[in-house]
Amino acid sequence: MTDSNRVSRRDFVKTAGSAAVASLVLKETSLATVAAPAKRRYAIVGTGERSIGMWGRPLIQDYKDLLEFAGLCDINPKRVAVAKKMLGVDCPTFTDFDQMCDQAKPDLLMVTTVDGFHSNYIARGLDRGLDVMVEKPMVIDEKQCQEVLDAEGRNKKKIVVAHNYRYAPKHQKIKEIIMSGAIGRVISVDFSWYLDVSHGADYFRRWHRLKSKGGSLWVHKASHHFDLINWWLDADPVEISAQAGLEVYGRNGGFRSTHCRACPHTSNCRFFYDMTKNASRMALYAGCEDADGYHRDGCVFREDIDIYDTMSAVVKYSTGVNMSYSLNAFMPIEGYRLAFNGEKGRLEVRDYERQPWPVEQQTEMYLTRSFGQREKIDIPDIAGGHSGGDKRIRDLIFMKGEVPLHMRLPDSRAGALSCLTGIAARRSAELKRPVKISELMRVPAKA
């Protein structure tokens, strides 16, 4: 993987019929003057639902002339076999990563395992000379972060961290409004994210419920949000003061079981999830759980849950900006509120993902200039995962076109800073004091 993003054969994204949504166009290069590239041998380690839906099927559909599946790897032998069948690919499957690398000989690796294992596979892939991509979060603690940066340095490679939310057109528009100076120097940021009782509860059913697996929602989920802020502000987090609690899930339940299908309390539980209605999950998880004991429909009230469902933080940035941030995982709505308070104005965003009332459009955005009028920024709804961000980042990764500097692929430094913000917040909440990023590790300077 390179960070130059050189050549493409078609537009990265089309404008959505409005000047308000910035387009990101890969420059065309005449196919008559460019030799057809050899297909890259592509392998995935970690074959869960996200792997298949984000880094499996779409690649087969959109980039079959650029990639061939060389191997699939998962520690669960049944799941990797089911994944291969679901994808319909003709490649070997493995439960041992080194064996896959030796026999399948990939040159491009996608890491989509449980978060706590990312660093291991990133480092081993880099040491084998592979180009490596990884789902966010890149890592879950500062030790793993250092291991990844060290592996990248000794191999003189550049990994790509799949911070796809940058590539939602609405988020690109926010970036470009701030860059334009329309609100002047940003002084502070207000950011509240809401996870509803469907999406939010789901993190407490799965492996994410354990800090050892996902680093808590400070890291697994909020790394999305912290990366956006770091990128929007073009600034590094410096110090975090945070509080957090487990107020709804885990030990707060009056009854519990191991998982929903085995639960005697289904008629009384407002969080009961009937996974039998989802054929794909039944095949990928229920049909494979006897191999590793993992329940995709785990009880949200299990007493081993050690992450938080309500979180708030104040983040200080290298540019002097302060951000007030919150995340709640038990809301009746899904979406976010965001405001940038600048010396010359204010940019406000209200994003609706799910709520029990109709809305005219998913995203409302307003720019109010000091001593001026309020201007509505038209943001058409964009179909696709993460409001169109999923496809746009895949196109940029695999088609390697030229893009503006601010839209280059997120690198290990971006991955590190997004994770370290959450790691510091988690530590601050537990130590009950502010935590500086410099206490955790020394982050490399910008290239």
Image: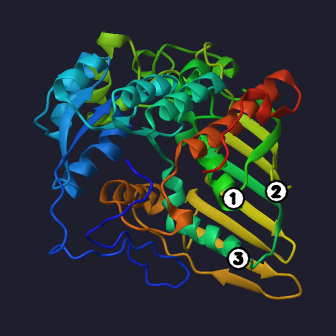
* Residue at the (63%, 69%) spot, across then down: 174
* Residue at the (49%, 26%) spot, across then down: 119
**For the residue labelled by badge 1, is the local secondary structure a helix, a strand or a loop?**
loop
Image location of residue 16, percent across then percent down? 43, 78
Q: In screen coordinates, is 52 left or right of 186?
A: left
Can residue 87 be seen here? The reply is yes
- Three-letter amino acid code of the residue under disc 3: Tyr
Label 2 vs label 3, nearer the camera: 2
- Three-letter amino acid code of the residue under disc 2: Thr
| Residue holding disc 2 | 319
Sequence order check: which comes first, mark 1 or mark 2? 1
* Residue at the (59%, 43%) spot, across then down: 413
* Residue at the (21%, 21%) spot, across then down: 102
Image location of residue 184, percent across then percent down? 81, 75
Sequence order check: which comes first, mark 1 or mark 3? 1
Can residue 362 be seen here? The reply is no
As measured in the structure, the alpha-carbon distance from the residue carrying label 1 to the one carrying label 3 is 21 Å
Around disc 3, counting alpha carbons within 10 Å, would you say few (fewer than 14), some (14 to 19), or many (20 or more)?
some
Residue 156 vs residue 399, the one in the foreground: 156
Around disc 1, counting alpha carbons within 10 Å, would you say few (fewer than 14), some (14 to 19), or many (20 or more)?
some
Vertical comparison of 270 with 402: above or below: above
Q: Quadrant of residue 179?
A: bottom right
